[in-house]
Amino acid sequence: MAKEANGNVQITFSLPWVLVGKAKKEALEALSKDAEIPGFRKGKAPVDLVEKNIPQNTVIEKALSTLLPKALADSIVEYKIKPAIYPKFELVSAKEGEVWQVRAVTCELPAVELGDYKKIIAGELRSKSITKEPTKEEKEQIVVGALLESVKLDIPHLLIHDEADSRISNLLARIEKLGLSLESYLTSIGKTPETLRQDYEKQAKEAIALDLILNKIAESESIKVKEEDVENMIKAAKADPNVKGNIDTPEQRQVIGSILKRRYALDSLIAQV
């Protein structure tokens, strides 16, 4: 296990052939049930014939999908790490009859040291020399700016990369709905693919940092979320025709609760400005 300067955590697994061979055999048996081989009914072809007709990568991926979760769980316990995201795996070595090597890259969330953030926010407000009462939106900008400036966090690049990818993917979907090409859109806003990526990575870094800071503030201030508030959010979401899928699940409730907790933390700071 190695922790990198950019915040990533790298783990290399050594998988004994006795386990790999067994997993590959089980993978082939599972894949053969859905295999369609000329001259045989679906799922009835011999396994050795199926092996010749299925891409090797498919078999390897199927086998590793049964081995890696346990290897990862064991490593998390052994090295006492707290992955922020599910790892990205890379097959390093996969020779028949030998130990297989698989590299996993994940990251841990940075520790958040708040400092005297309330004093810093108050000082930021005084430095603005505001002559009239700021709006709630202006207060929010002041609070957010003060938090990002005063609480320095080393956000792992893997988190930034994934968040930026998600934002760019959403942008591309919106552009497609408008019937535009990416090239024409970039021309209209005076950006290149490189500068657009830089902008989105900066936004991603700030968004992740703000979430971590607000989570820490909510924890330090013992901010709680009422179940009825979660219920109200779910009802509002269900009434929105643009919201797809089932949002009333334990996982979604947890996500909504986390969002509300950060919102309450931010609102508590805005109220003090």
Image (cartoon, grey):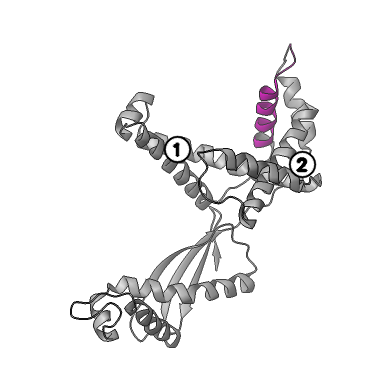
Which residues fall within the magenta stretch?
132-148
State whether residue 103 is above or below residue 237: below
Q: Residue furthest top?
A: 131
Would residue 214 be seen by someone viewing this image from the given angle?
no
Is residue 134 inside the magenta stretch?
Answer: yes
Mark 1: amino acid? Gln
Label 1 sits on residue: 198
Q: In the picture provided, is 169 more to the left or to the right than 146? A: left
Q: Going by the image, does 108 lie left or right of 269?
A: left
Camera-side residue of 2 and 179: 179
Left or right: where does residue 162 sit relative to residue 193? right
Which residue is at a point 30% across and 32% down the rendered structure image? 183
Mark 1 Cα shell of 10 Å, populated few (<14), some (14-19), many (≥20): few
Considering the numbered disc 2 on the image, is that residue within a helix, a strand or a loop?
loop
**Viewer-proximal residue, 127 or 145?**
145
Quarter location, residue 190:
top left
Whole-percent x and y of residue 125?
Answer: 74, 23
Q: Please tell me which residue is depicted at 53% across the width and 37% down the height of the picture.
A: 203
Quadrant of the rendering where the N terminus is positioned: bottom right
User: Residue 135's x, y, as percent?
Assistant: 70, 19
Is the C terminus in the top left, top right, bottom left or bottom right quadrant? top right
Label drawn at residue 115: 2
Identify the residue at image location x=55%, y=38%.
240
Q: Is residue 90 visible?
A: yes
Q: CA distance from mark 2 to mark 1?
A: 29 Å
Dominant SS type (magenta): helix
Mark 1 lies on a secondary structure that is helix
Query: Who comes first in sequence, dot 2 or dot 1?
Result: 2
